[in-house]
Image (cartoon, grey):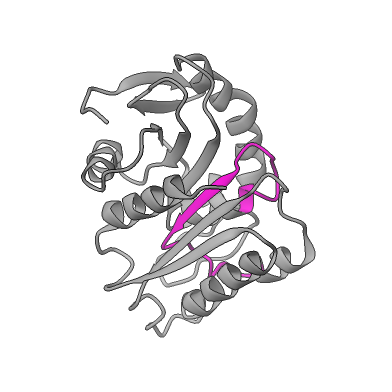
Amino acid sequence: MKTGKAVTLQANGKKIQLYGASQEAPLVLYHAVMGEGKALWEACQKCDCPPFTLAVINGVNWDDEMTPWPIPPISKGDTPCSGGADAYLTQLTGELLPQIMAALPSTPTYCALSGYSLAGLLAVYAAYRTDCFSRLVSASGSLWYPDFLPFVRQNPISEQVKVIYFSLGDQESHTKNQYLAPVEENTRFLAQHFSERGIQTTFQLNRGNHYRNSTGRTAAGIQWMLQQQV
């Protein structure tokens, strides 16, 4: 992959940056937390990822568009999550993704969805709401989210999903917050759950808390995901 400036699109209030748009390559979508798209692209290059196109979606309403259903604040001074993921996924697959596709030189070999924190939760949830994505990266995903495990147990994941990468920091579950504490147990459960259903799945435990090396962790997930032959 070669370093280059991003191609920028404006679509439905979202700023989308395209890196490395190349012929016959996978398309990886990533929802940015704080404009870290360039840093993620550079981290992926340092990882020597196979050729791919990275579409970074900026301007996300984090506590609404990344969350599957409403929950109250999980700590003092926090804000509630309103659970607008279904509406956002309709916009993503029906409006944003077609505009991204139209800007590419050729049809991607496949589409993958990646994300960190709540966007990592969305990556998994999306596989229950759309058939658009065949590979998922959930880096330090917010898989502590209340009622998410029962949802997974009770609903079928898209048959298109072939590869899932999970990661977590080894300090993330070391908290007195009753909402966040189950995150490692839940993530390990999900990795085993999907593996047992024939999906090529891995779980990586990294050193540090939730905020350590987020771009590096995500890049490692993208690299592993791209390298899988399925």
From the image, give the main secondary structure of the stretch colored magenta. Answer: loop
**Residue 171 % position (x, y):** 33, 78
At 53% from the left and 75% from the top, the residue drawn is: 188
Query: Is 212 on the left or on the right of 30, as rendered?
Result: left
Q: Nearer the viewer, residue 61 or 202?
A: 202
Query: Is 203 on the left or on the right of 93, as rendered?
Result: left
Number of callouts: 0
Indicate whether 90 appears above or below 189.
Answer: above
Q: Nearer the viewer, residue 90 or 169?
A: 169
On the question of residue 84 being in view, the answer is no
Q: Quadrant of residue 16?
A: top left
Q: Quadrant of the N terminus?
A: top left
At 47% from the left and 59% from the top, the residue drawn is: 79
**Residue 83 % position (x, y):** 62, 52
Q: Quadrant of residue 147?
A: bottom right
Which residues fall within the magenta stretch? 125-147
**Residue 48 % position (x, y):** 26, 44
At 52% from the left and 71% from the top, the residue drawn is: 187
Q: Quadrant of residue 151?
A: bottom right
Q: Which residue ends up furthest to the front in the rendered image?
A: 229
Indicate whether 64 appears above or below 152.
Answer: above
Q: Nearer the viewer, residue 168 or 69?
A: 168
